[in-house]
Amino acid sequence: MEKEEVQPWLPIPNCSRNVLITRNGSGYVARRGGVAQFQTGRLTFVGGGFTGNVSLFEGIDGAPWAFSNGDPDGSPAVLVRLGERLGNQERFTLDYAPAHGVNAAQIDPDRFLIIGNAGIVITELYPAATEVITRDLTNPMGLARLSSERFIVTSDCAKPISPTQAKSMVCLSEINTASRTVTRLAQLNLTGSGSELAAGVGTAAYLYSHFSSQGIVVQFQTLPVMNRTY
C-alpha cells in the first residue's frame, strides 16, 4: 500500500469476488463453484458444489465461511462453513431469494447478516428464522464486520447533477443489528455496482471499487466506536 504497487499473489485465472485472508494467515479464493485454501505454498480445495455468486468471509471464531446465492432454477442460497478438506463442510440452506444475495457476515454463533437486492436481513440458523432490516439499499455488495452490532456496507447511490440527470456513485453505510437501522456515512465519487470492503487492523478499513475505468483501493478510518471486535 505504501509503495502503491501490486504484485501477483496466486497465479490462478478466473477467480471471482473477494480473497479471504483469515487470522491464522491462510488465504482462500473462489473459482467456478469451488473454494481453495492457499497456505505455506500449497493449494488445497476445501469446498465445492456452489452455484451462482460466491463470497467468502471469516467467522467470529476465525473459521472460513462461504455464501453461495444459488440460482432461480432450483439451487437455494446457502451458507457453508468450510473445513480442512473437501467433505468437511457444513451447509445451511437459507430463506433468501435465490440469485439475489451478494454477501454475508456472522453476527454471533447462530445469526448471520445477509445483504443483496432482496433486502438486508438477519438469518438465524437455530431455529431457522429470517428478519428483514431494510430493502432500501440499491445493489449492496461490500460488507465488513466491525463488531457484533456494527457492520459497514457499500451500495449504489445517485447524486443529482441537474433537474433531469444524476451521477452514479458509491455509498458507504453502517448497519446496526441491535437497533435494526442503516445510517449513511459517506457518498463517494466512485463507479457503483462493483465494490468490496475489508476491515483492517485497528480502525483501518479498505474499499475496492472503480474510478472511471481504473480499479482502485481506498484506505479510510472508521470511527472509534466502530472498532472491530469479536
Image (cartoon, rainbow, N blue to C red):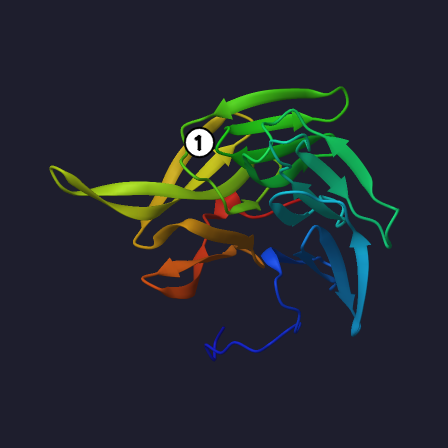
Between 34 and 181, the one lying in front of the other is 34
Using the image, determine if residue 93 lies above or below residue 10: above
Between 119 and 15, the one lying in front of the other is 15
Residue at x-position 77% and y-position 23%: 126
Residue 149 shows up from this direction = no
Using the image, determine if residue 61 lies above or below residue 175: below
Q: Position of residue 168 (x, y in %)?
A: 29, 46
Q: Which of the 4 image quadrants contains residue 216?
A: bottom left
Q: Position of residue 170 (x, y in %)?
A: 36, 48
Between 133 and 13, the one lying in front of the other is 13
Q: Which residue is disc 1 drawn over?
A: 182
Q: Amino acid at mark 1?
A: Val
Outermost residue toward the front in this view: 73
Q: Position of residue 37 (x, y in %)?
A: 76, 61
Using the image, determine if residue 57 lies above or below residue 69: below
Q: Residues within 10 Å of mark 1 (few under 14, many from 20)?
A: many
